[in-house]
Amino acid sequence: MTHPKTTLHFPQEATQSEVAYGRFVPIQFLQLLGRHSIVDVKLGDHVEQEMTLLFSDIRDFTALSESILPAENFRFINSYLSVMEPVVARHSGIIDKYIGDGIMALFPGSADDGVRSGIDMLYQLAEYNHGRTRAGYMPIRIGIGVNTGLVIMGTVGGHNRMDSTVIGDAVNLASRLEGLTKNYGTPLIISAHTLHALEDHKKYCIRFMDRLLIKGRYQAQSVYEVFDADPEPLRLAKLETLRNFEDALAFYHLGRSDLAQPLLQECLRITPDDRAVRVYLERCKQVTHPGHPEESDPLGMEIGWRDEYSVGIREIDTQHQELLIRSAELVRLVGNGSTRLRGILDNITEQVASLYSSEENLMRRYEYPFIEDHMKQHGAFDRSFSELRKEIESHARDRLYLVFRIQLILVDWHINHTTKSDLHLGNFLQRAGVS
């Protein structure tokens, strides 16, 4: 079953038993399931909803836990989690699970709630570490991954032992992003889905971090670093080097490590503590090492239709194919240095408007329950494409950088939206008899 988004309200009065149960199954979780009390919950109850998911974990926790007694271990974990729990609540989040030293939190309201919570957790961690240092303990580091997407909340288990849970591809990606923070030496990473779901991503300190092929996904996933909580000198230095860093990563991902290295070295001169810069410098060295051929088409940069992209609705699939054809043409023209781009950009703008109009008309006609979320994604794409068009028409950026931006915004975003949100819509419409 599906339900529209729910505004959560805490009961004015709760029995002692309800308060106790709420420590194990959050009241907000029950409300999202449409249940007033834990006794009303049945095995298999579920609701589908778009949410932002946050996973966090303490770095090197195994080594830390092995160096102290078990009782101290539990005191430490509970001390840390007690500090982080109110941070999540402050941003309208629900702690779904404590996984050892890890936290899985849900934000049914907005992507901004999840990102702000991640930033606030890092600020809170800095204060917590001051206390640990004063007490003679080593400071700790955490990693946080945030993703946004459709999930299914519900109850699983048997009749004698049930648990609440959240399942879906969006959950798996959020967990994966948390683990990836180790690779770049940055504590907070968000997906492109979350980036485009933010009300205004320019309010945050965000930079592109990588483009990854992830198991189970048709198209590469873009991931981004949020560095608002960095110590001020590092945060300001990252902002100062942002353009060089973005250009360098574009060159690297297009197979031009020779162009990326000088820019990364300049970034490192200004921000010697930027671990992501060091990571990419090392990658460039490995790629340009004798005997290590540079990829001619890294990460599947080809642009074309595949049967796996079909959503099963002829009208939508035809327009998706046409948009990819036009995107490939734009890449060719920009890559060749053409300055006569208004015609193709106008064509893409018209094609996107036609596609979105078709989808939105079908959603209204057949009362698609997630029309609001879906249309927000359309609006986010329109804003991103408008920014991209201005970049292209200004001729102020390197053409390879622009080619990479087209890949991220016009191709990756489009295909990932098609194979997730549009596929969900297509399945719904097919059940309604549309083909």
Image (tube, rainbow, N blue to C red):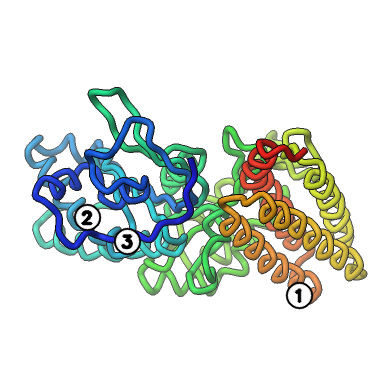
Amino acid type, callout 1: Ala
Residue under pointer 3? 122
**Residue situated in front as seen by the camera: 379 or 43:** 43
Residue under pointer 2? 139
Q: Earlier in the sequence, mark 2 or mark 3?
A: 3
Between circles 3 and 1, the one closer to the viewer is 3
Secondary structure found at label 3 = helix
The image shows residue 349 at horizontal and vertical percentages of 81, 65
Residue at 57% x, 59% y is 372
The CA distance from mark 2 to mark 3 is: 13 Å
| Image-based side of 108 in relation to 30, left or right | right
Q: Residues within 10 Å of mark 3 (few under 14, many from 20)?
A: many
| Image-based side of 37 in relation to 209, left or right | left
Count numbered badges in the picture: 3
Secondary structure found at label 2 = loop
Q: Which mark is residue 396?
A: 1
Q: Residues within 10 Å of mark 2 (few under 14, many from 20)?
A: some
The image shows residue 316 at horizontal and vertical percentages of 78, 47
Residue at 47% x, 49% y is 3
Q: Is residue 414 visible?
A: yes
Q: Earlier in the sequence, mark 2 or mark 1?
A: 2
Q: Earlier in the sequence, mark 3 or mark 1?
A: 3
Between circles 2 and 3, the one closer to the viewer is 3
